[in-house]
Amino acid sequence: MLSINKVAIGASIALFASSVAAHAGHGGPKPGGSKTMNVHKRASNTASNYQAEASITSTAEECTAYYIEEVNALASAYPTIWTIASIPTADTYASSVFNAMSSGIPNIAPRGTSNGDFSGVTYDTSTDPDCWWTQTGCTKPKAAGIPDDVITCPEAKTWGLSFDDGPNCTHNAFYDFLQTNNQKATMCYIGSNVMDWPLQAQRGIADGHHIIGHTWSHMYMTSLTNEEVFAELYYSSKAIKDIMGISVEAWRPPYGDVDDRVRYIATQLGLKTILWDNDTDDWEVEPAGDLTQAQVEANYQDILGNVSSSHGTIVLTHEINEYTMELFMTEYSKIQGVYSHIVPLTACMNWTDPYQEGDITYPNFEDYVAGTTMPSGSPTTFTISSASYSPYQGGGSSVVAAEGLATGAASSASSSGSKAKSSSGSSGSAASASSGSSDASSTSKSSASGLTKPLAGIAAAVFGGVAFVIFA
Ligand SMILES: *[C@@H]1O[C@H](CO)[C@@H](O)[C@H](O)[C@H]1NC(C)=O
Ligand SMILES: *[C@@H]1O[C@H](CO)[C@@H](O)[C@H](O)[C@H]1NC(C)=O
Ligand SMILES: *[C@@H]1O[C@H](CO)[C@@H](O)[C@H](O)[C@H]1NC(C)=O
Ligand SMILES: *[C@@H]1O[C@H](CO)[C@@H](O)[C@H](O)[C@H]1NC(C)=O
Ligand SMILES: [Zn+2]
């Protein structure tokens, strides 16, 4: 099916402008930027484990890079950090996983550029053939074999807590705050940040947060080739497995930019796509961004003012810098005053087994709100090693479907029965493909991620020749 339709340019401009204004509302590290981070080459910070890093109180010291030999040794098996991922030639296992899925990928062409310039792209938003969220807000895929995106928490007066673009080096005060409040969240980690700040990443899982992927380099995914989409998802999941010891089953698309081609590849990797239904635009807060604290507080206030007694919400907030984290800490007591429950997405979906590792169990909604917030079996010590990641492949779509996760309508929420899972992927060879797919027959999974904009603030996007600003 052809994805780019010849529609009247004038009409498409108007549709683009309004839909983008409505949906492209979150920020993250600016894609394609000139990040100069190295994988742990600077050695003045001598922290060598996550507890030591977690005890640092000066943000400057937190952000002084440290050298972890095992992470440095991993790097050659990965794409270059903060650049569009592709499969390194030597990685024959990743190639075999990609080749196994490639014939089924929907025939949708990449559109626009990796930093969100869609000028010259026309797309029929009235039929929305590819369920392209950035244009229409579509979250119910039209291609076969892909589950609906997760966009909300079904439970009443429940704030689904999710932070994009971590791990950020300055997060200690914020993670301490969450710990003090016995509060867990869903953390959407960028693979390049995990490689840059492995001790901060390890703290995230050790503290009991729910981890999902947010791609390797935080680009607009619909602009990338099939192999690049695959590699962005694959290597961010692999970094989380190799460094943090868990195989994620969900991701959040940077900028929410997802269509059925991208969803299909994610699904084949056993990754469920998670978006949101309320957005704080916190990434724009000063001094890194262009909104005053009062303006972003007003966004929080809108969400509080629209609280529903019949359902909850997944709110987009960011770990992108200390200012977004500080703002959340300021707002926390106000949220508590309006929402009965503030929960990680595992709890809001009753998703008790969000990783391939079957020995890790998260509390369901009932247990979480009763005070059992800590998962059991999640790692607290880490052995960093490569070649341990083995995605659910091929069977990813049945894996995701079998999970039976809530995707939006409260009535669709259900939790699945028992699932057989591999306790830890240790394949690294194509042979694991068959065990992966048999596993899939009795399990289901998926993932998603968000966005950031640390560098320049706003990306100018151009649709149909008309430039406007995307909040990213
Ligand atoms: C509900 O949200 C809208 C924006 O989405 C906002 O304009 C309105 O003021 C909010 N309502 C309340 C009561 O806060
Ligand atoms: C924000 O969340 C509330 C529930 O708290 C929900 O009723 C509302 O629809 C959400 N807003 C949007 C724009 O989805
Ligand atoms: C982390 O946050 C600091 C400010 O607190 C910011 O300067 C830095 O750019 C952020 N890092 C990333 C990778 O976003
Ligand atoms: C979660 O499970 C509880 C029972 O423990 C049930 O009452 C609730 O409806 C479930 N919620 C969702 C969103 O599945
Ligand atoms: Zn993001």
Image (tube, rainbow, N blue to C red):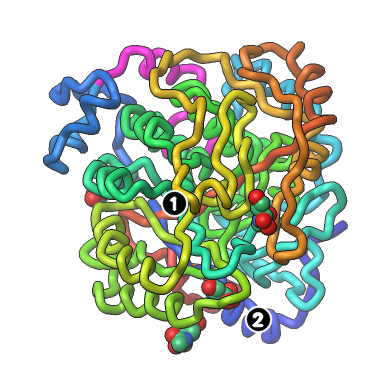
Between residue 291 and residue 375, name the one nearer to us: 375
Between residue 356 and residue 236, name the one nearer to us: 356
Above or below: residue 379 compared with residue 335: above
Q: Of marks 2 and 1, which one's residue comes earlier in the chain?
A: 2
SS class of the residue under badge 1? strand
Q: Is residue 88 left or right of residue 56?
A: right
Find disc 2 in the rendering and name its residue.
15
The 10 Å Cα crowd at callout 2, few under 14, some 14 to 19, many 20 or more, is some
SS class of the residue under badge 2? helix
Above or below: residue 248 compared with residue 366: above
Residue at 44% across, 51% down:
164
The 10 Å Cα crowd at callout 1, few under 14, some 14 to 19, many 20 or more, is many
The amino acid type found where label 2 is placed reads: Leu
Percent x, y of residue 389: 59, 21
Quadrant including the C terminus:
bottom left
Q: Looking at mark 1, is its residue's CB closer than 8 Å to ligand 5?
A: yes
Q: CA distance from mark 2 to mark 1?
A: 28 Å
Q: Is residue 399 left or right of residue 312?
A: right
Quadrant including the N terminus:
bottom right
Above or below: residue 130 compared with residue 373: below
Residue range (magenta): 67-86
Residue 33 visible: yes
Above or below: residue 43 compared with residue 200: above
Residue at 29% across, 55% down:
325
Residue at 63% across, 35% down:
353
Which label lies toward us, 2 or 1?
Answer: 1
Find disc 1 in the rendering and name its residue.
164
The amino acid type found where label 1 is placed reads: Asp
Percent x, y of residue 176: 26, 43
Residue at 60% across, 32% down:
355
Percent x, y of residue 377: 51, 25
